[in-house]
Image (cartoon, coloured by chain):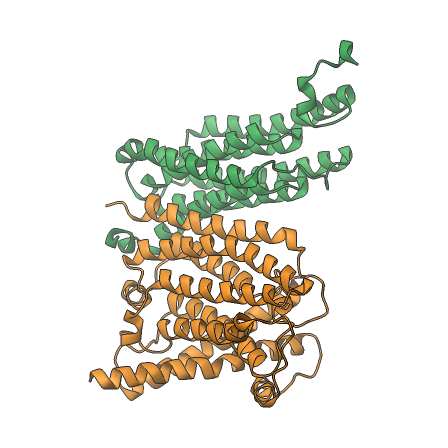
Chain colours: A orange, B green
Amino acid sequence: MKVVEWLFALLQMAVFVAAAPLFSAWIKRVKCWLQNRRSPPLNQPYKDLRRLFSKQVLLAHTASALFRTAPYLVFGATVIAAAVVPLIALELPTARIADAIVLVGLFGLGRFFLALAGLDVGTSFGGMGASREMTVGALAEPAMLMVIFALAMVAGSTNLSTVIQSMLAQGLALRPSLLFALLALLLVGIAETGRVPVDNPATHLELTMIHEAMILEYTGRQLALMEWAAQLKLMIYGVLVCNLFFPWGIAQTLDVASLLIAGVLLCIKLIILGAVLAVAESLIAKMRFFKAPVFLAVAFTLALVGMLSFVMLESAS
Amino acid sequence: MTRYLELQLVEQAIITLAAMILVTSFALLGQSRVVATIRTFAWQGWLLALTTALVAWDIGHPHLYVSALLTAILKGALIPWLLTRQARQLGILRDVDSIVRPGITLLIASALVVFCYSVALPIGQLVEGVTRDVVAISLANVMLGMFMLVIRRKAVTQVVGFMALENGIFFAAVAATQGMPMVVELGVAFDVLVAVVLFGVIFFHIRESIESLDVDALNRLSEGEK
């Protein structure tokens, strides 16, 4: 049974990694519909990745070994993070590798090497992007940890699988702590994955870009890995929002029927979440970079109030 | 923890709304634009009215419906409208009353909430029913309103802080003693209304004498020094 569990965990991780570009493509498609444009086909990100993988890698003269290894480290850290997050089944051996705090650490590791790679070549765009990324990250991480602490207080554990199980066990309940944690996680996710009010993922032509500025010097398969890692990070946040706050339907046993149901339900949840994200991105204009700290302070406050309201309102005996 | 899950949906809604009122108090502290501050205050009024109505339904006190209605009309609609009109007449509706140190302000506000929680613990023991835990939140609203009075520099936003403080007191009355006697409540409601009208007059006087609504300017004695 142990071997089967491990095999399934690896399979789930592979599905996670493989589905990530699809989720980005879906968000792009809804945005195109909203803007009355013809959308690219849903397999466009896969075609892009294949094209990039088959292209020659060009390196700047000033690039060091760090610049060449950073894409693999960033992608690797993000894949491990994806392995830790329960996708359609609970109680897998990979869920026991790490808890939510380590998940934040893995994102931090990826961000560290991403920023270093941005600085490495010595272009001004790379340095600006790295500086902005670290500014956003330094403010987003405490907010993310506050969300995790609020969840951990409700569930009594920081392990994602255990948290989801306690959410399932409590059934439908209106809890202020979870409500505010959800709102805060949405805001943090938007900031961390570089979506619209904080960063614009669709353009290389803005002086205010963050993520694109750091990977501007990458080509070929290294660029492919960096872009894939970014898509995977977006998918991880989407799955976190779906599975932590709306876990109904996730498979608790490893039989075919429950796994199928879990997969279909997760697809529906992600489709809805992606559509909501696309609508929000179409309605909101990108804000000035100096407004980003305010945005993240709101997320931090919401998570903090979530934690406080658990202590003050929900824990009395 | 199991106890919270045993509550009825209405009671869970009351507690969630109470937490949302706390969030609006934080938002009031963080808003820098005058118009956004007034709008947040209106939201707080509506949430307060909704919470009062739900409490009335939960414990079956019909007179609380009247309080809820009064709150909705006065604090949700009339007072924000009056304040917006006065601000527009003074030409300061779009002005910015910036917060000096947002991070420290936020931390002090959170510390105030924790302080209120520890203070309100023994009070909560005396209260029966679902609103027992809400007493701490209402006290925190009072403190946050007072804190807003301290840190704001524009007269209009200070008045909003004062009104938020009054919201907290009203909320405490609803939470701790299921509302005040009707006579007191009506009296307070109209006092608040009159206060807003009077504040409006005072705004004009302040601006006539110091040509600004920045109350920091009141610290200096201008007659001789200029």
Q: Outermost residue toward the top? A: B224
Residue at the (63%, 61%) spot, across then down: A127
Question: Which x, y percent locates residue A123?
Answer: 67, 65
Residue sticking out furthest to the left: A1
Quadrant into which the N terminus of chain A falls: bottom left
Residue shown at the point (32%, 56%) measured from the top left: A152
Q: Is residue A5 visible in the rendered structure shown here?
A: yes
Disc tally is 0
- In the rendered image, residue A56, in percent from the top left (x then y), is placed at 62, 87
Image quadrant where residue B33 sits: top right
Q: Is residue A189 left or right of residue A251?
A: right
Above/below status of B104 relative to A173: above
Q: Please say whether residue A25 is visible from this viewpoint.
A: no
Residue at horizontal 41 percent and vertical 41 percent from the top: B62
Residue A243 point in image, percent of width and height? 39, 70
Q: Residue at x 38, y 66 (%)?
A: A244
Residue A30 rendering spot, x and y as whole percentages: 61, 77
Q: Nearer the viewer, residue B5 or A297?
A: A297
Quadrant in the picture for residue B55 = top left
The answer to which of B137 and A79 lies nearer the viewer is A79
Horizontal side, residue B164 vs residue A265: left or right: right
Left-right relation of A2 to A105: left
The answer to whether A248 is drawn above or below residue B151 in the figure is below
Q: Indicate the quadrant containing the C terminus of chain A: top left, top right, bottom left or bottom right.
A: top left
